[in-house]
Structure formats: C-alpha cells, structure tokens
Image: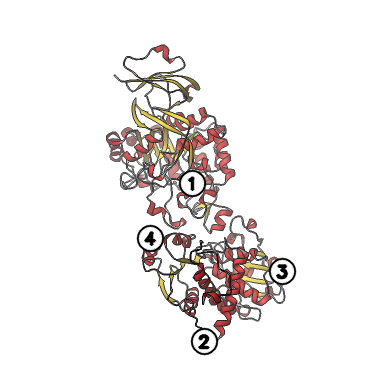
Amino acid sequence: MTATVFTNARIVDPSRQLDAVGTVIVENGVILAAGPEALNQGTPAGAEVIDATGKVILPGLVDARVFSGEPGAEHRETIASASRAAAAGGVTSFIMMPDTHPVIDDVALVEFVRRTATATACVNVFPAAAITKGLEGAELSEFGLLRDAGAVMLTEGRHTIASNTVMRRALTYARDMGLVISHSTQDKELGSGVMNEGLLASWLGLPGIPREAEAIPLMRDLMLARLTRSRYHAAELSNGMSADAIARAKDEGLAVTAGISINNLCLNENDVGEYRTFFRLSPPLRSEDDRVAMVEALKNGTLDIIVSSHDPQDVDTKRQPFSEAAVGAIGLETMLAAALRLYHSGDVPLLRLVEVLSTNPAKIFGLPGGTLKPGAVADLILVDLDAPWLVRKGDIRSLSKNTTFEDARMQGRVLQTMVAGSIVYSA
Amino acid sequence: MTNTDPFPVFPHRHLLGIKGLLPSDIETLLDRADAAVSLSRQSEKKRSVLRGRTQINLFFEASTRTQSSFELAGKRLGADVMNMSVASSSTKKGETLLDTATTLNAMRPDILVIRHSAAGAAALLAQKVGCSVVNAGDGAHEHPTQALLDALTIRRAKGAIAGLTVAICGDVLHSRVARSNIILLNALGARVRVIAPSTLMPSGVSQMSVEPFTSMEEGLKGADVVMMLRLQRERMSGSYVPSVREYFRFFGLDSERLKLAKEDALVMHPGPMNRGVEIASDVADGPQSVIQEQVEMGVAVRMAVLEALLDPRQAGETA
C-alpha cells in the first residue's frame, strides 16, 4: 500500500474539461481522486503529502511517434534510454515506430519490444507494427496477429505507401481488425528534396520539397478513407494545405485524425540557417506562414495531437553536407517545454495543449492514461509552468544528441513524473 | 615583400561564397587580379609571395579546367601545390569529405581549394580545418571564383559593371555559377536577368534580385552581356527539357538571337561548352565571344584570391 497526495495543485484534466486548484490522491498506482473536492475522500493512511502550491498536475504525455535504435542500432538509442528521456520530458507513454533493424512486422518482434520494455523501460512503451512486411509497401503484415501480440497501431513509420491498391487494402483490412492506420505522407519523387521549397532553398542551392509532396498522397489517403470507411490518422503534417484537407474530411464526417510534430509548431525553415543539419527533418520545417496556420489548426481542432517525432541520429551522420546528412531530431525531453511556448505566447490555452499532448493520443490509439479521472492509472506529471531552463547538450538523456533545441531557453519544466503511481523522474 | 603590397587587407579567412563580401572586397580582389594579369603576360611569370606555402586542391568532382586554373595560380605565386582527386564513387561521399579533411588537415596545408557535389560542403570543411578554404564549387550553391573571373572579364571589356544589363541564360536551377553571379553583379550595381524554361528556374526566382524571362527573344533585348550556362547531359533528355534540339531551338544562343542584344554585347560561357546545345559554334568562336579571356582571367582571379587569403598582414585578424 503506497499512497501519494498532492495538495493545492492546479489540476488540468482535459478528459473532464477540468482546470482547477485541488488535490490529487494516488493509491496503489491508481488515481483515487483528483479535483477541488478530492480531499473530502480523506487522506489515505501513511500517504506521502506533497505541497504542490503554484505547480500544475497534468496527465502524463502520450507520444504517438517515437523512433528507437533498438533493435539494430542500440548506439543511437535503446528502448531503456528512450524511456529515460521520455520520463524527463513528462512523457509517460509512447508508441514506438517499427523502423528498426529488423523491422517490427512480425509477432515475435512485437513481443520482443514489449518484453524489452517491461524489463528495461521506466515508462509505458507500446509497439506499432509495420503496415507492410519490411516496410516495403507491397505485402500486408499480419494485422490481427500483430494486434493480439500487443501492437497498438499500424504505421509505415518514415515511409509512405506509394501503391493506391496496397493502401486501400491496408485500410480495409485494418478496419476489420479494429486498428488505426497512422501514415506519414511524402511523395517519393516530388518529395525527394531536402528542405522546404522556396527562396531559402534556392539560395542555398538545395533541392526543395513542395507542400504538395505531402498533400497529394494525403488527399489520396483521405479519398481511400472515404471509400473504405476506415479509421485513418495522418501521422505528421507540416503545412496549411494539408490541414485544409483534414478539415474538409472532418466536415464530411470521415473518421480521420491528424498529428503534427512539435518541430513544425515551434520552428520554421529559417532555422536551417547555413546548412544546420540538425534541422533537416521530415516533413521539412516550412515557412512561418505554414507554422502559424498549423498553430491555428491545432487550436481549432483540425489537428488532434502533437508528437515529438523523436528520431535519434548519431552525430557522425549529421556532420555531413546538408543533402547527405541523416534526417530527424530527438524530442522526447523537450516536447512539453517547447509546446508550452504556445501557451506562454497566448496562442493555445493550457487545457487544449494538454488535450493534444495526452488525452487525445491516448483516446485515438486506445491507450490507458491521458486522464486524471478517479480509477485511472496514475500516469501523471508535476510541472512548474514558469521555471526557466536552458537545453544543454550535456544534460540530454537520449544516447543521441541531435536536438533542434540545443541551447534554447525554455519556460516550464517537469518536476516529477509518475508512472502507475511510481516516481520515475524527479528534477 | 609584405609592405610593398598595395592592396588593402582582405578581411576574410575563407572564400566560401560571394555572399558575405562587400562591394569593396570584390573590387579589391578584381584590382589584385588585374595586376596578376599583367604578371601572367610577362615571359617571367613566377613570383615568390607564396613560397613555402602549401596549397591542396581537393576535388570530389572532376573538373579539368578549374583544377588546372587553381594549380597554375598557386604555382605562379610560388606555392607548393598538391592535387587530390577523390572519385565520388569510391566511398560514401560524406564520409570521404570529413575523413579526407581530417587527414589533410594533419598535413598542415595553408590553403585548401575544394570542389564538391553537395551544397554547403566548403563551409563544412572550413569548420573542420585550421587553414583557409576556397570554395571551387559546392553543389548548386556557389562558385565564387567563377563569378569573380566573369566580373573581371566584363570590367576589363566594359570599363565598369554598374549600370550594365547582364542576361544569364540556361540551367539557372542547378547552377552555382548563376547564384554567385547574381549576388556579385547585384552587389556591383548591374541589372541581372535570367532566361530559362520554368523547369530550370529556382523556386522564388523573382525574389532573387533578378528579372526572370522564359523567352530568349525578350530577355536578350538590349543586354550588354550574355552569359550562357552549361546544361548537364542528364537533364536534356526528358527530365527537365524534352530534347536537345528543342532546347537549342528555344534557348540556344545563335547569331540571329544574339543580334537582339546590344551590338557590342559580350558572349560568355563558364565552360565546358555543349556546342549546338546551349550555344552555336559560330557564336562561341565569334567576335563578341570573350570565352577565351574568361579562361585567362580565371588564373588571374585565383592568383588574387590565394594571395589575398594568404596575405601575411592578415595573420591575427578574424574572418
């Protein structure tokens, strides 16, 4: 019997539209009560009481897009090291992408991820399975068996399925198995550039990626989602054209949701500067107009979730000419603080921000967490919304240090992360 | 030797691009190059200002003329010149660049001249080595010595660059020569036009301080200088333009079209030329062509750049 009581905390729980000062009582890994009236329950005997005056309690973040090096590239990141980064960033659950060596396209590999996570990770790690075998875009993997083994989502990871027929069958069959398909859309040819197409790329002499490279396959997917009446999730969108397509699909009543990487909400193409390879991302950082459009889309409900797109790459593959450098950035440790920029700037209310970082991803992918309702698993974080800090390379817990926020000033940090009632991180 | 140098100190450690140079920096390099032309025309061409200095030409892309131009420039100034050609197919390109940089740096060169297929490669190298770096072409980014030699050629023929109308024609999209020239010519007060089919125009070209044209007839009208660009073979058969004959028909420079430009307009080409693709032979070899002068100016400009970057008065100054 262990119990913890947080008193005088500002409790933000989008699952109940709750934003009020009160008490959170955790006992045996479960939330007993959370809210202004929670103290009426009485404090459990022997509970540790933490005065959280001036602090905020949020449901732990749920990150639906995390790449791991394990299996196959453990020098970049292991499941354990990713989980420590997650805990420090207030992420209590994440979905691990299947882009590993070998690809997670088989029951045994889903089991490997779950086993490794249970044995070594300090947060909840849920495996995603590849839509097609080997991520080759041709043969469907065993959706039903993968689901039964514990895969919570089907995705092609960094890849985009080019074949309309394969995509149609995947959507149709996933519907039968009750699985959501999460797809990142980038046309292979039209998207063969290395940064946002436009004046900056032109001066740098770098091949550009037009917004249409993302929007065309996305629109194809939305048409197929209509045809198949399947659940479809757009994994990470970067521009207003894509957001408009999602908004139209939602208006039409399609079962469609969409996510965005924290990078595309906080940064733009100017951050690439003179060939800064840590800012080579997919989808690429877009124009400031697109960034602003995406913040608006996040606010108005067109976009449903924020992901970190945590993608550890070792420094050697980043210390290359821009067009030859590896793609991607880590983000588990900085996602919350970066997202809080949108709160501090007045762009997005805190309740909405927590909804897209925690409640919505849990709901969309059917995961526990994302709520502080009584009876829910006690995955929660204690946050100081105003604490200033500097992202120092030396403090990064990920095995790879390719952050887009090196030396960035942040406001708001995680003080404590609790997974199933146990403290897995303390600042 | 040093106190007889009549030119102001060049305030940069590397020459990675035209971007970042002040008009006065450019003019000084051109003045220095003018002096080098005179030297090169003497029978005794050799000076000793760079005696004891080591210059390494590191070429990841084959380029006979640029490499030999840099080699000759270094040798005329008395430097020890070593050529390294790294076939880009031998290993993965990026690894080769950084590994090679580390190795070469240990040989303590004074100046590294680099040509690479990736934009930003010269800048990356400059962060890794302890000596001066000259960009001899990085992908579609910049080729500063080409723009300088073009400017010198124009200045010597026309007296000045300010006020001239320069038409740059051809594969602007992939051309580092075009980018460096656009920046330089604008800095010195020229009006710059670019002429190309839209498939070979960079995105946002109208915001690049140029006037874009998709018709040679329109774009050449009244031009003082016609600068042709090379069209790579792999781009002329269906990927960017349908065929060689169609390209030459609409974007090739022949004597009829040239008449649309000013009567005394200069015809330039960075070489190597595709005769009958972007330029007709009679124009390339005709009286308005300064293509041979460009080659001569190339050596002079590279001498000027090497001398400016290795100027002993520069020691201790920041880049």
Residue at image point 29% right, 19% down: A1
Mark linked to residue A283: 1
Q: Chain of mark 3?
A: B
Quick one: label 2 or label 3, which is nearer the N terminus? 2
When asked about the image quadrant of residue B59, the answer is: bottom left
Mark linked to residue B221: 3
Q: Chain of mark 1?
A: A
When asked about the image quadrant of residue B5, the answer is: bottom right
- Counting labels gives 4
Q: Nearer the viewer, residue A161 or B189?
A: B189
Q: Which residue is mark 4?
A: B95
Q: Secondary structure at mark 3?
A: loop
- Indicate left or right for A51 with B73 as reference: left
Q: Nearer the viewer, residue A143 or B290?
A: B290
Q: Nearer the viewer, residue A278 or A237?
A: A278
- Indicate left or right for B226 with A354 as reference: right
Tag 2–tag 1 contact (CB < 8 Å): no
Tag 1–tag 3 contact (CB < 8 Å): no
Q: Position of residue B97 (x, y in %)?
A: 40, 63
Local packing at callout 3 (Cα closer than 10 Å; few below 14, some 14-19, many 20+) is some
- Indicate left or right for A337 with A287 as reference: left
Q: Which residue is mark 2?
A: B44
Spatial distance from mark 1 to mark 3, Cα to Cα?
43 Å
Residue A363 can be seen in this image:
no
Residue ranking furthest to the bottom = B43
Q: Nearer the viewer, mark 2 or mark 1?
A: 2
Kind of residue at badge 1: Pro
Residue at image point 60% right, 68% down: B26
Q: Secondary structure at mark 4?
A: helix
